[in-house]
Image (tube, coloured by chain):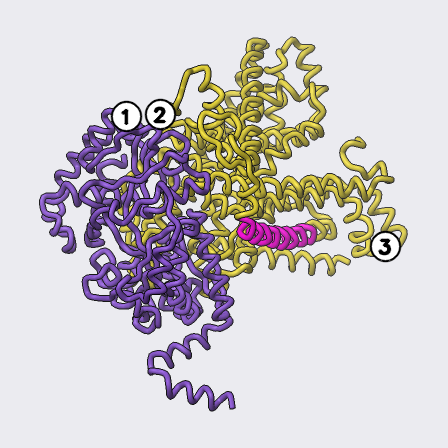
Amino acid sequence: MKLSLVFALSLLATPALADWQQTLDAARGQTVYWNAWGGDARTNAFIAWVGEQTKAHYGVSVVQAKLSDTAEAVTRVISEKAAGQDEGGSVDLIWINGPNFLAMKEQGLLHGPFVADLPNARYLDLGPTSPASVDFTVTVDGMESPWRLARFVFSYDSARVAEPPRTMAGFVDWAAANPGRVTHPDPSNFMGATFLKQALIELTPDASALQQPVTDAAFDAATAPLWVWYDALRPNLWRGGETYPANESVQQQLLNDGELDIAMSFDPASTAAAIADGLLPDSARVFVPEDGSIGNISFVAIPYNAANAEGAEVVANFLLDPETQAHMQNIEVLGSFSVLDPARLDDAANTAFAALPTAPALPTLAELGPTLLEPHASWMTRLTEEWARRYVK
Amino acid sequence: MSHDGRLLRTAVLVVVGLGLIAPIAIGLWQTGRAAFGILPALGQDMVSLGPWHELADLPGFATSLRLTLVTGIGSTLLSLVLATGFCATVHARMNTSAGARMLTPFLAIPHAAMAVGLAFVLAPSGWIARMIAPHAGWDRPPDIATVSDGWGLALTLGLMIKEVPFLLLVILSALSQIPVARHMAAGRALGYGRGIVWIKMIMPQVWPLIRLPVWVVLAYGLSVVDMAIILGPSNPPTLAVAVTRWFSDPDPLMILPASAGAILQAVIVGLAVAMLMVAEAAVKRLGRWWIRRGGRGSSAEPGLWAASALVMALMAVGALAMVSLVVWSMAWRWSFPQLLPESWSLNPWSSAQDGWMRALSNTLLLAGATVGLSLGLAIAWLEGEDRARRSRAPWAEALIYLPLLIPQIGFLYGLNVGFLQIGLSGGITAVIWAQALFVFPYVMIALSDPWRALDPRMIRAAAALGAGPGRRLWAVKLPVLIRPILTAAAIGVAVSVAQYLPTLFMGAGRIATLTTEAVTLSSGSDRRVTGVYATLQAGLPFAAYLAAFLIPAILHRNRRALSGASAT
């Protein structure tokens, strides 16, 4: 009886969905070790919620391996490969993008392509130039699945700062007028590098050159104005530019402590969220440079030797469920913008998104202005190396 | 009987060799291979000096090296001087066991938790600045680098706050083996100042007894990672932190220069210890000449008082740091320049409950397992020595100290590769094993002296009554030694709770403990949740010490001679 039902269902189902049923069956009972940066309590809480849901719906448990840097998980997979552990690996799912994705993809450390197999991928715009298909100009090729939208924004305390800088160039004058009140995370950190990239896109003579892999000649020509700008800015940075906060969370804490007037984030909702959590004063607000800011999508990828790859796919698929994305975009939960294409959602889902609560420090999509494309990942590596060569003594 | 003893000793030797020495050797071997260009997994199989050239060319390498030397050697020497000066001034005036009890919180709290507290107390927006702010008229924190400063002063201070109490304890226990009062009386009668009697007569006798612990402090200070991440400079950091970061660089080929850095770290510690030995020889020579000159040196007194005042100041800052952890864990908003939170909440405890409960249970499991194993091995080792009626050979003593003298970063990466090859990595077993490498030495050291000091007449009486070696162990030695055994266990718990790198490297990031979570959270934005983890992290070892104090007191409430040090 049961067997014949399965048989009947398999006749009805499309081949892809039949495969998906196999994935669901294999995934049941698995525990997925999701390696994700652990510095943000709300994200950690969201990941815990995801685990509760996948456990209830699919019998898949999620354990977050909290990283202080995503590269830790990459290194772990590499050392497993080094030791010949090609299956049963300890990392099942990684929150990843940019250089870490490029490194893993180039070295064949990823499982996939798997994104097209996920039933909820139908809500994504997977066109060749869509942000969901291109990660730092590297084609995704189905090797990682999107889960949250990131936009580079600044936050400031409106009680202390009347007029934040309007452009990246404007930071020089603003810092000269307010010495020691602004800085950026260490460029060895993702967010510090993004600050430099944001300035590079605005200051470089030809921003389209940044979409090609970097060459020596292109690098020198494109970055010359950046270093002039930075040399003018640096003396007026916090601590005279001798030291930098380790990451954006530390910088947010410095904003809360009153040691700084400006912090930055890759999440437009983080300021409103931090106010609600008592981590920033009520007067904190968001601003973006006039010409727009860098945006990208955060992905999840599965290592080639993951012990629980099926479970990881189930989690990746759950993350793309419209209900999950609406829950995630809720400012009271995480406040991260959805990665789904509104045109592909049904009315019920779109209404759910429209009904989400709002907050004074939460910018609207219009206020965020245009999204600037990330430069090719090779630029970030060269940029941070060159910065270290110039300024780490 | 001697056959039985030999069997026991062989078993202990095999366990120590395979369990403790082999992992270190394998780890150093694997790291060393990578340091000279051999990393087959990445297609690197040519012996070369390339990784060393790369290491030397990495930005900030020279500064990292300098920072490591200045903070590691500086904090050790300053701690030694201050601890000595403090003992010289205070020893005669205080009750030793009461003093040791006062040190307990400082010994129990892990380095990372102390660092988290200090980072707040010392910060430009921290507690000390908030006390000054109303008087100095600051409406915003001053732009001064008081933590993560380029000189590593905050890190040096943090290390001293942890190492001075440790050295005080070591010196106090050494002093109990020396007739201090008699020497002091003789010296004073000959007209020497109190301080100079200490330097000329007492310290030369104390030094051989504290030499190894000072080496351990030196090795630790040169290679500390968790405290240096939180309090040390970041641009560039100390060598140990830089190496830890290079090991987790997105570019896997960075493992090669990172391994070279890890080996260099081990070489630095070796050289620093060698330097200390040379200095000891030089001081010995100079000291003889100085003593023969016969200066009475009453002028040394102000220096000693200054040292004591500095020690008290260090303790006060350390105490503030510990209190700040608890206060933050119960704060909601606490902004500059408020001395106390504007609003209180238990939300940090309740909202992060799932997280800290899991971390706490992992930490308890690891502490229980490592301390159980270490205690078992230590007792077997000591009993083996008893049955052989032999004292410990110098090589055996060196074996015990080995894991404490080789920097963790020097062999943990290689050991992880070794563990992966036998399929152990990423699990609780691997973490227990790696932690036990560091827990066992402390348990062994803590238990050795009390074990040897056991009154031999009790054993002889038991033997005369017909008790065999096994019964003498179970029915006489262990019950009589319950207090030192529990103390050794408490020290083991403190060591296990504090382990950061072994847990991180061997646990594949999966085994979250209070310490790994506190260090990760300290690079986050929520000091309140960090406060929760750090409070628990400090509270757990403290509870272990308290238990080690209370359990024997209850068990032996009607056995006055067994109620511990207070009876003598």
Taking B340 as reference, is B477 left or right? right
Estimate the x, y position of residue B301 in percent, counting from the top left.
58, 12
In this rendering, the answer to whether B512 lies above or below A90 is above
The label on residue A179 is 1
Cα distance between the residues tagged 1 and 3: 80 Å
Q: Nearer the viewer, mark 3 or mark 2?
A: 2
Estimate the x, y position of residue A194 in percent, counting from the top left.
26, 45
Q: Is residue A285 magenta?
A: no
Estimate the x, y position of residue B135 in percent, counting from the top left.
46, 15
Cα distance between the residues tagged 2 and 1: 9 Å
Task: Identify the residue at horizontal 41%, vertical 85% (top origin).
Answer: A9
Q: Nearer the viewer, mark 1 or mark 3?
A: 1
Task: Identify the residue at horizontal 82%, vertical 49% (top origin).
Answer: B476
Q: Which residue is mark 2?
A: B143
The chain in purple: A
Task: Identify the residue at horizontal 50%, vertical 52% (top origin).
Answer: B503
The chain in yellow: B
Q: Are marks 2 and 1 in contact (CB under 8 Å)?
A: yes
Task: Identify the residue at horizontal 19%, vertical 37% (top origin).
Answer: A167
The residue closer to the viewer here, A326 or A238, is A326
Q: Badge 1 local density, few (<14 within 10 Å), some, or many (20+)?
A: many
